[in-house]
Structure formats: structure tokens, C-alpha cells
């Protein structure tokens, strides 16, 4: 039994193995057949796709437009029937096929339309057959072309006869009649709107988003149809484009105390974006620092100070008497003057707001606007070239920027070992003192105005050598002051120029303006001949003006200004200078022949001995105690 049983089991195993082999062979055969079928289908599909574009192009070329449309629509049906859940990798390829066929049709349509537009081409029967027979493919392209044509006409890029000619050629084609007919009837309405639309686009090109939107809103309110739709589209496009830059501009105005400009900007934005909470908040921030304004009809107070005595110990110490300290105010004296001016109701203004000089041949007078109850004030910081002969008076050596990008004065103090150690301080120079004062008295400035920095050139610019010719003049001054000579490489001079540019950028951004006080700080410009004025001015423009572009003011040293009709003044005006500052103890200004003239009152301890400044401050209260303890 044992042997039989063993033999039996062996037989059963062999029998089962043969059945499994036959099943596996069958399954393998089915798989191979399916694979062959799939490969055949894929091959046919690939072959079909490979032939689609050539067949479509050939049908178009042979005028078989019904066949071409059938090829296009067949692929389109496959795309529309696409199941996102299916693992079908051919979808993107079919989209590409549709795009390729559409581009073939577009190219042919554009060729016909371009000839109609540019050459007044009358479509032939073959053209009309193609445009009409390709139905939705040509209709979509022509609709875009006609829409573009109306836009070009609206913007003044094409004339009305050319527009009507195109419509006359395309409107009769049955495939386009539903599109072209209504648009053709709107051409006359488009013509009446072109003026406002072009004005809006001009404002946009000049960066005046508000004017552009307002113009388009007027158009949108007057017209329906194409013009109304176009203007609505442009309003949305401009609003999307304007929001971020205008918000950034407005918030920068707030940071720079340009509250009146910010109020106007945010008021305009609030009208365009009435639901915007951020705009309403910024508008409130601006209006919190504005008040009613009035036109100023009187004269404008112009005060002028030189570099300050930053180091009183050096000016009034053991070497007192080596320099004329009576020319320079101390930092404390300048601060006291500002306090008095603020208490008397003065407000800083920009004199360039008193005229329009866009035309080089003449200026337009403008009335100055100030907050009600305020009196306009201009402050000039004179000749920040930092003459080395003035160092004994404790003046700064140069301007620098601190880590917060604020303009500071730099002077030196003697260390215990006799070395000259630099000191950087915002209150070492009038610029920083005025900046700080305004930040603490926001109503001391009208719309962010600060003062005017006048620059010479023969010594330096802000204490920096910016030209090799200037270095020779500088060393002469150093020699006169018994100070060591200086040497600079070309790279160091270029670094100095960049330092000046950086300071100028900060000053402009924070409300300061610039003036020339002539390159050589001419003692009497009126008596200098034309050749001398031309040479001096050209040197200033080349060496200093290149670092401070768009400078339109001159502060004449010692006040000896050149009369406006003098040929020397004509030369200056022809080089862009339109505001002249002379000198006088009281405020005075006059509009002359293509220029605006002011008297400026030069403030110094020496001047306080000879003139009554009680309208501005009490001289006895102003003078620094350290000065009073020394004989002047």
C-alpha cells in the first residue's frame, strides 16, 4: 500500500503540472495578442497624428476646405471627449495639433487681411471661398483682426477711410456678417470717442494713472457697445497697473512729510477704489497733517547761513582768533533761530513752486500756496565746499551718510596723542539739524520742503575731490591753511563722485533742493566779464552739475548778482539757471525776463552787529554763551 500510495501522488503532481503549463501558455498567448493589438492601435494612432498636419495643410492648399474642417473637428471632438480620470497621455499632443492647425489658418487669414489693410487689396474669389468655408476657424481670427482694427482707429493709429475699406471687403462674406456688420455700424461712434481715449492714453504714458482712469470713466459713461466695453476693459487694466506703484508713492510721501501731495493722491485713489480700507487709512494719515491753504501775495523770506561751527572748542579754544568765527553760526545758534522762526509762524517752502519753467524761453508766474496763518520761508545752506582755511573755525570737513542713510557732518577733534579723530554727527551741520527739527515740528514744512544747498566747486563738493583739476585748487587752499597736501588716484576720485551722488540722492529724496554758488565762489559776479562767467559756469556744470543734474538756481556770493538782461545772465539762463539769489536785509523778489530773482538775508554773528533781525529773532537770545565769553 505504501508503494502504491507514493506512486499515486507522483502521478497526480505530474498531471497538475501539465494543466498549469497549458494555462500559462494560454495566458501568455492572450497577452501577446493583446500587446500586438495595442501596438497596432498605437501605431495607427501615431501614424494618424503624424499625418494630421500634412493632410490638413494639403487640404487647405488644394481648396478642400470641407476635408480640412473634418480633420480639425475630429481632433477637437477627441479633446472634448477627454476623460481626466483615464490614463491617456495623448491629450497634450492633440491640443498641440489643434494649435498647429489654427496657426496655419491664422497665417493665411493674416496674409489676406494685411494686404487689404496696407495695399487696399480686394479679395479674390479664392480668398473669399477660403474665408467663408473655413467657418469657425477663420471667423475667430477675423473677429480678432476687426477688433484690433477698431482699437487702432480709436487710438489714432489708423485712419477712418482705411477702417471702412476693410469692413467693406469683409462684411459681405457670410461667415463674418454677424461679426462685421454690428462693428461696422460702430465706426462713427468710435470716431467721436477718439479724442478722450487718446487723451487718456497720453496721461497713462506720462504716468498719470488718475487722469487716465478719470478720462476712461467719462468715456464709459457716454458710450455703449464697443467703445463702452473697451473703456471698461482699460479701466480695469489701468487700475490693476496703478494700485501698487501709487500706493508705494503715496506712502513714501507720508514718510517724507509731503502730506498735501499725499492727501491729493489718496483722495484720487479713494474715488477709484472706494472700498479699499488701506487707502482710507492712509488718507486719514495725510489729512491729519494738512490744513486750509491760501495764496501768498507778499514777499518771501529767504535766509542764508554758512557751514556751522561743529566744534566750539576748536573755534573758541586756545587758538581762538585764528579764524573769523563771526562768519559762522554754532549748531546751538542755528537751532535757536529755527525755534524763533517756528514760533513766528514761518513754514518752509520750495521757491521753484513760484514759477513754471518748462519752456526755456519764458517762465510762467505762479502764486505760492501756504497753510492759512503761515508765512513762507526759504533757507539756503551756503557753499558746502568746506574750504580748509575755515577748519580753524571748527567747521566740518565733509558730509557723510550714517548707517541709517541720514546726512551728517564730519569734523575732527584732537586726541590725547595729537591725532585728528573724526566725529560724525547729524547736528554737526545745518542739514541734519533742520531735518531733525522738521521731524519734531511737522507743520514747519509745507509739503515736505526743506531748504536749498548751494555748492561751489573749486575746493571740493561736500568735502570730496571729484575732479583732478579741482585737486590742484584744493591743494592751494590746504597750503594756505598750512595743512598737508592731498593725493588721489583716479579710482579714488571716482569713489568720491559716487559718494557725492549718494548724498545728493538722499537730500533730494528728503526734500532738499540745490543751487550753484558759482564754481570759484566769485566775489563779484557782476564785475566778472562774459568770458569769466562762461568759464566758471562750464566748470561748474562739468564737475558739479554732472553730479547734481537739473539744478536751476544760482546763489551769488556776496549778493552781487548779474542783471537779468545782461549777456552774462542770458548765458546763465540758456544753461538752465532760472532763479537768482542776490542779497538784501529784507525779503524781496521780482519776476524778470525769463527768471525769478530773490534777495536773501545772510545770517551770521557779524551780520547781527549791523542789521536788525527782530522780525526773525532776538540776536541777544540767539548768540551762543561760548561766543559771548570770547571777544569777536
Image (spheres, helix red, strand yellow):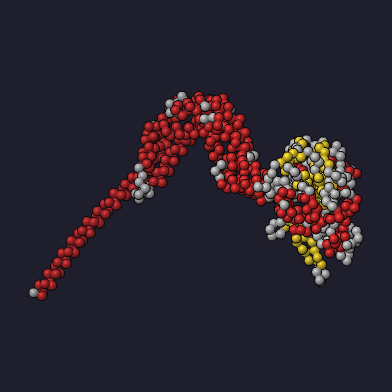
At x 76%, y 58%, the residue is: 427
Q: Quadrant of the N terminus?
A: bottom left
Position of residue 545 measured from the top left corner of the image (x, y, whole percent): 77, 48
Residue closer to the observer: 528 or 472: 528
User: Is residue 33 visible to the viewer in this orientation of the structure?
Assistant: yes
Give the residue displayed 60% in from the left and 31% down from the top: 196
Which residue occupies 78% across, 48% down?
344
Query: In the rendering, at what x and y percent does residue 359 appear?
Result: 75, 36
The answer to whether residue 227 is visible is no
User: Relative to residue 461, is residue 78 depicted above or below?
Assistant: above
Q: Quadrant of the C terminus?
A: bottom right
Q: Which percent across, then down, holds residue 40?
A: 31, 47
In the displayed structure image, the side of residue 582 where residue 157 appears, left or right:
left
State the residue at coordinates (85%, 37%): 565
Q: Which quadrant holds residue 497?
A: bottom right
Q: Which is more toward the observer, 407 or 188? A: 407
> Which of the two residues, 37 or 595, is positioned nearer the viewer here?
595
Q: Is residue 253 left or right of residue 356?
A: left
* Direction from residue 90 to residue 307 in the image, left or right: right
- In this rendered view, identify the residue nearer to me: 606 or 621: 621
Horizontal side, residue 375 vs residue 156: left or right? right
Q: Quadrant of residue 292?
A: top right
Residue 618, horizontal then vertical, whole percent: 84, 52
> How many numbered marks, from 0 up?
0
Q: Which residue in the rendered view is the most extreme toward the left?
A: 1
Amino acid at each position: 500500500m505504501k508503494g502504491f500510495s507514493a506512486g499515486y501522488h507522483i502521478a497526480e503532481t505530474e498531471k497538475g503540472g501539465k494543466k498549469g503549463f497549458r494555462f500559462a501558455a494560454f495566458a501568455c498567448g492572450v497577452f501577446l495578442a493583446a500587446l500586438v493589438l495595442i501596438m497596432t492601435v498605437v501605431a495607427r494612432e501615431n501614424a494618424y497624428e503624424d499625418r494630421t498636419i500634412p493632410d490638413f495643410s494639403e487640404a487647405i492648399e488644394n481648396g478642400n476646405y470641407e476635408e480640412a474642417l473634418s480633420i480639425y473637428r475630429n481632433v477637437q471632438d477627441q479633446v472634448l471627449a477627454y476623460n481626466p480620470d483615464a490614463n491617456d497621455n495623448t491629450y497634450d499632443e492633440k491640443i498641440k495639433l489643434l494649435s498647429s492647425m489654427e496657426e496655419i489658418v491664422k497665417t493665411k487669414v493674416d496674409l489676406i487681411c494685411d494686404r487689404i489693410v496696407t495695399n487696399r487689396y480686394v479679395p479674390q474669389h479664392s480668398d473669399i471661398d477660403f474665408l467663408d468655408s473655413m467657418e469657425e476657424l477663420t471667423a475667430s481670427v477675423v473677429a480678432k483682426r476687426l477688433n484690433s482694427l477698431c482699437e487702432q482707429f480709436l487710438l489714432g493709429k489708423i485712419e477712418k477711410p482705411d477702417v471702412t475699406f476693410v469692413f467693406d471687403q469683409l462684411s459681405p462674406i457670410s461667415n463674418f456678417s454677424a461679426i462685421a456688420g454690428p462693428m461696422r455700424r460702430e465706426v462713427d461712434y468710435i470716431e467721436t470717442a477718439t479724442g478722450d481715449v487718446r487723451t487718456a492714453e497720453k496721461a497713462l504714458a506720462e504716468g498719470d494713472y488718475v487722469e487716465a482712469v478719470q478720462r476712461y470713466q467719462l468715456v464709459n459713461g457716454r458710450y455703449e457697445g464697443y467703445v463702452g466695453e473697451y473703456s471698461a476693459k482699460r479701466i480695469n487694466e489701468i487700475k490693476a497697473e496703478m494700485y501698487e506703484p501709487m500706493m508705494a508713492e503715496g506712502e513714501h510721501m507720508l514718510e517724507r512729510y509731503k502730506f498735501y501731495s499725499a492727501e491729493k493722491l489718496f483722495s484720487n485713489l479713494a474715488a477709484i477704489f472706494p472700498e479699499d480700507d488701506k487707502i482710507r487709512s492712509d488718507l486719514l494719515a495725510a489729512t491729519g497733517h494738512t490744513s486750509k491753504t491760501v495764496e501768498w501775495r507778499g514777499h518771501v523770506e529767504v535766509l542764508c547761513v554758512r557751514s556751522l561751527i561743529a566744534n566750539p572748542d576748536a573755534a573758541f579754544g586756545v587758538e581762538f582768533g585764528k579764524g573769523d568765527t563771526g562768519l559762522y553760526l554754532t549748531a546751538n545758534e542755528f537751532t535757536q533761530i529755527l525755534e524763533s522762526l517756528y514760533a513766528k509762524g514761518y513754514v518752509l517752502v520750495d521757491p521753484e513752486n513760484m514759477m513754471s519753467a518748462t519752456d526755456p524761453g519764458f517762465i510762467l508766474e505762479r502764486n505760492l500756496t501756504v497753510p492759512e496763518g503761515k508765512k513762507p520761508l526759504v533757507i539756503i545752506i551756503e557753499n558746502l565746499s568746506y574750504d580748509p582755511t575755515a577748519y580753524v573755525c571748527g567747521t566740518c570737513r565733509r558730509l557723510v551718510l550714517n548707517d541709517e542713510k541720514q546726512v551728517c557732518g564730519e569734523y575732527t577733534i584732537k586726541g590725547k596723542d595729537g591725532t585728528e579723530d573724526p566725529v560724525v554727527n547729524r547736528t554737526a551741520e545745518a542739514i541734519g539739524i533742520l531735518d531733525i527739527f522738521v521731524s519734531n515740528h511737522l507743520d514747519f514744512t509745507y509739503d515736505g520742503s526743506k531748504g536749498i544747498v548751494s555748492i561751489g566747486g573749486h575746493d571740493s563738493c561736500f568735502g570730496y575731490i571729484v575732479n583732478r583739476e579741482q585737486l590742484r585748487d584744493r591743494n592751494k587752499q590746504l597750503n594756505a591753511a598750512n595743512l598737508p597736501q592731498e593725493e588721489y588716484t583716479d579710482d579714488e576720485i571716482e569713489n568720491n563722485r559716487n559718494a557725492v551722488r549718494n548724498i545728493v540722492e538722499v537730500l533730494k529724496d528728503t526734500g532738499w533742493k540745490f543751487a550753484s554758488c558759482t564754481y570759484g565762489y566769485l566775489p563779484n559776479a557782476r564785475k566778472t566779464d562774459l568770458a569769466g562767467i562762461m568759464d566758471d559756469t562750464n566748470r561748474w556744470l562739468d564737475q558739479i552739475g554732472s553730479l547734481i543734474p537739473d539744478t536751476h538756481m544760482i546763489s551769488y556770493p556776496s549778493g552781487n548778482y548779474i542783471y537779468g538782461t545782461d549777456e552774462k545772465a542770458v548765458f546763465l539762463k540758456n544753461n538752465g539757471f532760472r532763479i537768482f539769489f542776490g542779497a538784501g536785509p529784507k525779503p524781496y523778489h521780482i519776476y524778470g525776463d525769463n527768471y525769478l530773482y530773490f534777495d536773501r538775508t545772510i545770517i551770521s554773528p557779524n551780520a547781527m552787529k549791523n542789521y536788525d533781525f527782530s522780525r526773525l529773532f532776538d540776536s541777544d537770545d540767539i548768540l551762543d554763551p561760548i561766543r559771548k565769553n570770547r571777544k569777536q
